[in-house]
Amino acid sequence: MPEEKPEKYYLNEEPVDALVVYCSDPRFQKAFRHFLKNELGIKNPAPLSLGGSIHPFGQRAEFMENFQMLRQQIKFFLEEGKISRVVIINHDDCQWYKKFKGEISSAAIQQKMIRDLLSAAEYITDNFSVKVETYFARLNGKEIIFEEVIE
């Protein structure tokens, strides 16, 4: 039996069309990718995926190191990558937010997540010449519905 050759992988040299910041929750990854590509037309994103997505922007005092790290990564991508579009997504049932918010209602957590989206968008637009879009992924049973968050 002949030895199978491994599949070859190639460097993607297409230009990045958006910096995308979203939660690393594995339950949402397929929906995020589909939404970015099929709804927003983003074919080659630079993803920043971390627990709680943009949460350090809303909790700078408690998570200053996280805020500084995320801010530096965003700055790097926007300045070095010459990216002019940023998409930020938070989602329902985020375990990261639940862990750090304690025993408060789901509605209060959701309000906090939306404030954090808007805070991050304001910071980014104030410091960089980019378009920022914010979205909240809501659960409707097991279906995920993306809604734009506008101040």
Image (spheres, helix red, strand yellow):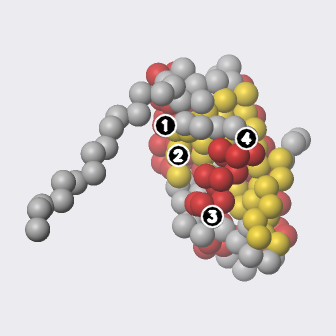
Between residues 17 and 63, which one lies in front from this camera angle? Answer: 17
- Amino acid of disc 1: Gln
Q: Residue furthest front?
A: 1
Name the image quarter holding residue 67. top right
Residue 136: x and y in percent read 77, 55
Residue 144: x and y in percent read 75, 65
Residue to which mark 2 is pinned = 48
The residue under the point 79% across, 55% down is 146
Residue 100: x and y in percent read 62, 69
Vertical position of residue 130 compared to residue 65: above or below: above
Q: Which mark is residue 28?
A: 3
Residue to which mark 1 is pinned = 73
- Amino acid of disc 2: Leu
**Element at badge 1?**
helix
Category of crowding for the residue at label 2, using alpha-carbon neighbours closer than 10 angstroms: few (below 14), some (14–19), many (at least 20): some
The residue under the point 48% across, 48% down is 65
**Element at badge 4?**
loop
Measure how far apart labels 3 and 4 are at the Cα level: 16 Å
Category of crowding for the residue at label 1, using alpha-carbon neighbours closer than 10 angstroms: few (below 14), some (14–19), many (at least 20): few
* Left or right: 3, with 112 as reference point: left
Between residues 69 and 142, which one lies in front from this camera angle? Answer: 142
